[in-house]
Amino acid sequence: MNKGKQPTIKEIAKRLKISTSTVSRALNDHPSIGLVTTMRVKKLAEELNYEPNRTAIFFKQRKTFTIGVILPSLSEAFFSAAISEIENLANSNNYTVILGQSLDDPERELRIINTMKGHRVDGIILSSAKNTREFDYIAVLQQAGIPVVFFDCVPDLVHTNAIVSNLKTGMHEAIDTFVSCGHHAIAFINGPAHLPASKEREEAFVEALANHNISLNKDYIVYTDLSEKGNEQAVLELLNLSTRPSAVISFNDYVTLDAMNAVRKKGLTVNQDIFFISYANYPIWKYMENPPMASIEQFPGKQGALALQMLFDLIDKNVAGGTEDTSLTDGQRIVLESKLVNQHL
Amino acid sequence: MNKGKQPTIKEIAKRLKISTSTVSRALNDHPSIGLVTTMRVKKLAEELNYEPNRTAIFFKQRKTFTIGVILPSLSEAFFSAAISEIENLANSNNYTVILGQSLDDPERELRIINTMKGHRVDGIILSSAKNTREFDYIAVLQQAGIPVVFFDCVPDLVHTNAIVSNLKTGMHEAIDTFVSCGHHAIAFINGPAHLPASKEREEAFVEALANHNISLNKDYIVYTDLSEKGNEQAVLELLNLSTRPSAVISFNDYVTLDAMNAVRKKGLTVNQDIFFISYANYPIWKYMENPPMASIEQFPGKQGALALQMLFDLIDKNVAGGTEDTSLTDGQRIVLESKLVNQHL
DNA sequence: CGATATTCAGTAAAAGATTTCGTAACTTGC
DNA sequence: GCAAGTTACGAAATCTTTTACTGAATATCG
């Protein structure tokens, strides 16, 4: 039969006694090939079950229609929502997604980036590991002509393309909500202080309190390293204060979950003794008997979609413009507002 | 400088005034190249920041060190746990993962498979869409020499490689537990009847009841299409029975979540009026105030890891053996026992 | 009718690495 | 000192597809 081999364009050419270039052009509907020939080629291709060898095309065209997506973790709801949307959108644009998870390890992140560079991906979407401090690879990728779009965890540098979430709007809404429910003792469990995301949250927290003329109580801001233990300790710090807060905003839903467990262990009741609002809007809240009072939605899917859209734009410019195109060096940013949603109570 | 181009072995050869074959061999530590030459080549390669063009190698070697993973959904906890582990393991074996989600749409699944075939992946791990009935693509992939390993949702065919979860052990343990707690009115919310996974669960359910000499009440087996509405309706059927069950085993945790919500809406109390056990062990249970009594863990990460291991074996055999190797046609299966864990109460 | 377009298809190079085959130069063994 | 073996490297083919260039045949026009 076909000797277990995939048919090639050469095979078609031989059978039809025409040249491979004609076959290639016919299959790509090139106008310089006559209708009859084109039909003959396509017919035989169909019969032989011909499929182009994409590895050859990738090689020749220096384009792989592949994008790399690197995330800290695939099992975190925020990221799996994002990757899900990215894959979906990439797929409908005939792009393929290759995947890497850094597990928040900068070394591993770097290794993945190099692998993807080796695979000659057309672009990379990257939510960097929490403790990545070295971003030299950005220059390397730029040198290699591979555009990068950051999202969620974005390095604090100019000249990077990114989708950033404006965490402030959500924080303001959250505090408005708490205040309008009569809360004045509002605390904040923040993440690691060095993260831009933590800084932004904290600024917004301070601002929002000021807006309501609530004086800032330093004890009401505590920090967690985002581990389960860290989360528990952070909330315990708050609970052990002489006047404990009645409302807590926390870094994200995972922190809130651990915090709530700790609260219950202390014999207190969520949504009675103490109320929560946190970032991320974990899809599970609707199933909880005592969910947080509300959530600050960050739209992971939308962020992913925007990131991919921006990446496509960069890839196009990359193809159109020369190597000296500045589109890669100039960083563009799109800001997505966070929003208070799911008034669960 | 380097004209914005990536250096190639040709460039190295030219500068060193040796042939490209020597460079290639030197870089691959081929024994027929002298130590001095090898060192010189490696040194220059380092200086020039040479990186092999993998698209060229993939093309030449007919091997991409890439595997495809196709899952129904990336945002479901079970699958994100699996992909996370697969990516992890693939990464440490210097393989790259390309990703596709079928969204339980057979057409989309097929398209993804073809794309991956085009990418010349070395193998595919596939958890097929729930309502895929046509598995012709298996033959096509086999013809193309691409091994496939199924897991979780496995077609009911011989000659397929798969990691299957033995759902029975878990069911037996679950019912043992219920009975030992005094329950005799045990119901079962099953998934769509056509799924092998549903059939297996139901068989085990019937067997386990028989083991305890509990006569089977047909009304105590209801079905859901796994939609939120379907899940609610299913549990309502049970609750509206003249003698409602005191214990319920459900198809999976998502069903249980919806069922619990419905139970509460009816004014009943979970873990008091009615108890649940379900498959999957959703990681969120530890945060719930009224979690199911226990969970039947299916070890998604482990299943993924085993699938990848099996795939690697098949890829190796594929390389070693000829095209006529039967290893691809003979289906091998590994069974992983499900297990009752997290006695949450 | 001859000059010029237009149409259609072939030739060959190119992309970057690996690999088969071949061959100089040098070392052994006797 | 010569056959045989070893060492170290080069030339060229190869993997598949695309594409710039070229050329032949046919059509069009003045």
Image (spheres, coloured by chain):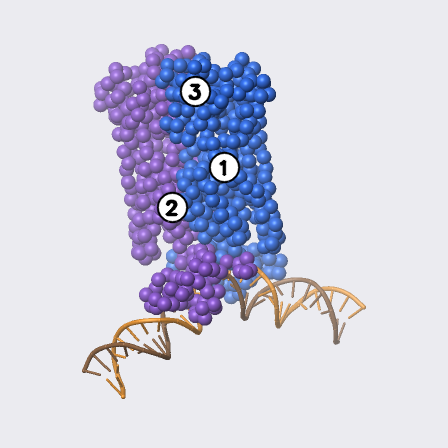
Chain colours: A blue, B purple, C brown, D orange
Q: Distance between the residues labelled 2 and 1?
A: 22 Å
Q: Given this view, does label 2 or label 1 mark the residue nearer the observer?
A: 1
Q: Given this view, does label 1 or label 3 mark the residue nearer the observer?
A: 3
Q: Amino acid type of disc 3? A: Leu
Q: Which quadrant of the structure image shows residue A273?
A: top left
Residue B265 visible? The answer is: no
- Residue placed under numbered mark 2 in the picture: B91
Indicate the position of residue B279 as horizontal and vertical percent values. 34, 28
Q: Which quadrant of the structure image shows residue D9?
A: bottom left
At x 59%, y 21%, the residue is A211
Q: Which mark is residue A65?
A: none
Disc 2: which chain?
A: B
Disc 3: which chain?
A: A
- Residue placed under numbered mark 3 in the picture: A238
Q: Distance between the residues labelled 2 and 3?
A: 41 Å
Q: Left or right of B15: which side holds B168?
A: left
Indicate the position of residue A250 as horizontal and vertical percent values. 47, 25
- Residue placed under numbered mark 1 in the picture: A153
Q: Left or right of A81: which side holds B156?
A: left
Residue in front for this viewpoint, A138 or B91: A138
At x 51%, y 47%, the residue is A138
Q: Distance between the residues labelled 1 and 3?
A: 27 Å
Q: Amino acid type of disc 1? A: Cys
Residue A186 visible? The answer is: yes
Q: Which of marks 1 and 3 is nearer the N terminus?
A: 1
